[in-house]
């Protein structure tokens, strides 16, 4: 599969990254341009990820160079060091960097996102009846606590500002140094 993708997209010097978890990720070159190749069995999940990355274009995200079912080719950040290197010795600086990255990402407009992304209020609005049915009163859930939790949830949702795009996988290994920025 990797050979077919490498031939189709003119990829070379592909090597696996060390911090793999769910997807298979490699770094390499497309022609002479540094890239990241991401392969996943979760085709729909990778499509959502590509759409989210595109939504963050111009606000601190890398470019999506190529996409097909289960395959994503991304621009590679250079020097490519992750914020993980700052822990534990430079925690204060790392927190400031994370806050700056989040502020930049939250400036991305929601309008124009190709695939509708899940909205927090829709997620929670659909959940309480389902929660009540699945938990039920028979299983020892105290009705007072459940009602209080639902009321707090409603209050928190009413107190939010305008909606922003959230990065669904924002952690120290996904905050990468690119030139003089993160």
Image (tube, rainbow, N blue to C red):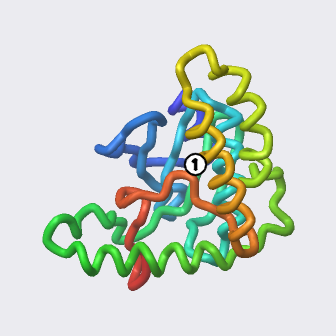
Q: Nearer the viewer, residue 132 or 22?
A: 132
Residue at 48% x, 36% y is: 23
Taking the view exactly as shown, the residue that stands out farthest to the top is 138
For label 1, the crowd category at 10 Å Cα-Cα, with few meaning under 14, some 14 to 19 and many 20 or more, is few
Taking the view exactly as shown, the residue that stands out farthest to the left is 89
Whether 147 is drawn above or below 66: the answer is above
Taking the view exactly as shown, the residue that stands out farthest to the bottom is 180
In the picture, measured across the screen, residue 179 lies left or right of residue 146, that is left
Q: Which residue is mark 1?
A: 10
Q: Nearer the viewer, residue 39 or 1?
A: 39
Q: Could you tell me which quadrant the C terminus lies in?
A: bottom left
Residue at 75% x, 74% y is: 162
Whether 20 is drawn above or below 137: the answer is below
Residue 3 is situated, as x and y percent measured from the top left of the image, at 52, 32
Residue at 65% x, 42% y is: 147
In the picture, measured across the screen, residue 17 lies left or right of residue 90, that is right
In the picture, measured across the screen, residue 182 lies left or right of residue 3, that is left
Residue 18 is situated, as x and y percent measured from the top left of the image, at 29, 44
Tally of numbered tags: 1
Q: Secondary structure at mark 1?
A: loop
Residue 96 is situated, as x and y percent measured from the top left of the image, at 36, 81
Residue 68 is situated, as x and y percent measured from the top left of the image, at 71, 40
Q: Could you tell me which quadrant the N terminus lies in?
A: top right
Q: Nearer the viewer, residue 12 or 172?
A: 172
Whether 166 is drawn above or below 46: the answer is below
In the picture, measured across the screen, residue 134 lies left or right of residue 111, that is left
């Amino acid at each position: 599969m990797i050979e077919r993708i490498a031939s189709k997209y003119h990829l070379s010097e592909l090597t696996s990254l060390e911090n793999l978890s769910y997807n298979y990720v490699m770094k390499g070159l497309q022609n002479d341009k540094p890239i990241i190749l991401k392969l996943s069995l979760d085709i729909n999940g990778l499509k959502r990820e590509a759409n989210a990355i595109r939504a963050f274009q111009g606000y601190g995200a890398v470019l999506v160079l190529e996409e097909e079912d289960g395959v994503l080719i991304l621009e590679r950040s250079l020097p490519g060091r992750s914020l993980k290197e700052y822990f534990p010795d430079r925690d204060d600086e790392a927190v400031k960097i994370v806050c700056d990255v989040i502020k930049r990402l939250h400036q991305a407009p929601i309008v124009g996102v190709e695939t509708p992304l899940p909205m927090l209020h829709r997620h929670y609005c659909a959940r309480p009846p389902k929660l009540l049915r699945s938990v039920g009163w028979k299983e020892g859930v105290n009705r007072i606590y459940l009602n209080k939790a639902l009321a707090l949830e409603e209050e928190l949702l009413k107190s939010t500002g305008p909606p922003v795009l959230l990065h669904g996988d924002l952690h120290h290994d996904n905050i990468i140094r690119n030139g003089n920025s993160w």
